[in-house]
Image: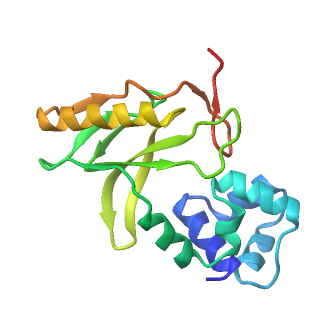
């Protein structure tokens, strides 16, 4: 896939319109449309901002996504399914409750020094286009996210209808890009 196709795909996956991305980058919507049509490319500085805003690597934008997805799928990821339907999980910011049919852990690609290293995603539905994921929590260490998955698994096995995160990192939300770990 080309840069334009990759940009369009990831932008849509993140639920960001061309107008919203244009506002983030300080460019026109037509510039975004031009890039997504492979009729031009953003400046290097804009690539960095796009990468942060969409929380993906520049490699992912510039390379063939199918090759990157194969690599991702070959990496071991923890997935827990709720066999009885769904389990309600409160998000890290206590603003939402997500009815998850499964949860999936994933490392953050190239996190900054003060950024979480792992993310826990809740899958609330699967459509023709794939899994619909929602960020449940951010984690500073592999040990913390592994403990969380064990606890969620126990809750599912015990027939719990709801679960509240216990090991997620305290983070400061940023408008765009990965959150920053709060200093304790």
Query: Which residue appears farthest toward the top when viewing the image?
Result: 184
Q: Is residue 147 left or right of residue 53?
A: left
The quarter of the rendered structure image containing the N terminus is bottom right
Q: Position of residue 34 (x, y in %)?
A: 77, 79
- Give the residue drawn at x 20%, y 32%: 155
Of 110 and 133, nearer the camera is 110
Q: Quadrant of the C terminus?
A: top right
Q: Is residue 154 above or below residue 20?
A: above
Residue 166 picture location, percent across and down: 38, 24
Task: Answer with the quarter of the image where residue 73 lies.
Answer: bottom left
The residue drawn where x is 56% and y is 66% is 12
Who is closer to the viewer here, 121 or 32? Answer: 121
- In this picture, is 109 found above or below 119? below
Residue drawn 75% across the image and 70% down it: 32
Which percent across, then down, holds residue 113?
71, 35
Q: What residue appears at the point 69 percent right and 67 percent down from the top-left corner?
A: 59
Give the left or right position of residue 16, taking residue 40 as reference. left
| Residue 28, image x, y percentages | 82, 66
Looking at the picture, the colour scheme in use is: rainbow
95 lies left or right of 174: left
> Is residue 163 placed above or below 61 in the rendered structure?
above
Asked if 118 appears above or below 15 in the picture, the reply is above
């Amino acid at each position: 896939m080309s840069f334009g196709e990759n940009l369009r795909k990831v932008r849509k996956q993140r639920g960001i319109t061309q107008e919203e991305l244009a506002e983030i980058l300080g460019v026109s919507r037509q510039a975004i449309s031009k890039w997504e049509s492979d009729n031009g490319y953003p400046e290097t500085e804009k690539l960095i901002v796009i990468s942060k805003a969409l929380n993906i690597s520049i490699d992912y934008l510039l390379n063939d996504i199918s090759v990157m997805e194969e690599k991702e799928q070959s990496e071991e990821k923890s997935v827990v399914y709720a066999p009885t339907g769904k389990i309600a999980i409160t998000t890290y910011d206590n603003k939402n409750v997500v009815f998850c049919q499964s949860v999936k852990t994933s490392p953050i690609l190239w996190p900054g020094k003060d950024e979480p290293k792992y993310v826990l995603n809740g899958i609330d539905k699967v459509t023709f286009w794939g899994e619909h994921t929602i960020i449940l929590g951010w984690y500073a260490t592999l040990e913390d996210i592994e403990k969380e998955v064990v606890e969620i698994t126990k809750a599912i096995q015990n027939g719990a209808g709801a679960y509240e995160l216990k090991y997620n990192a305290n983070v400061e939300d940023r408008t765009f890009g990965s959150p920053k770990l709060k200093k304790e």
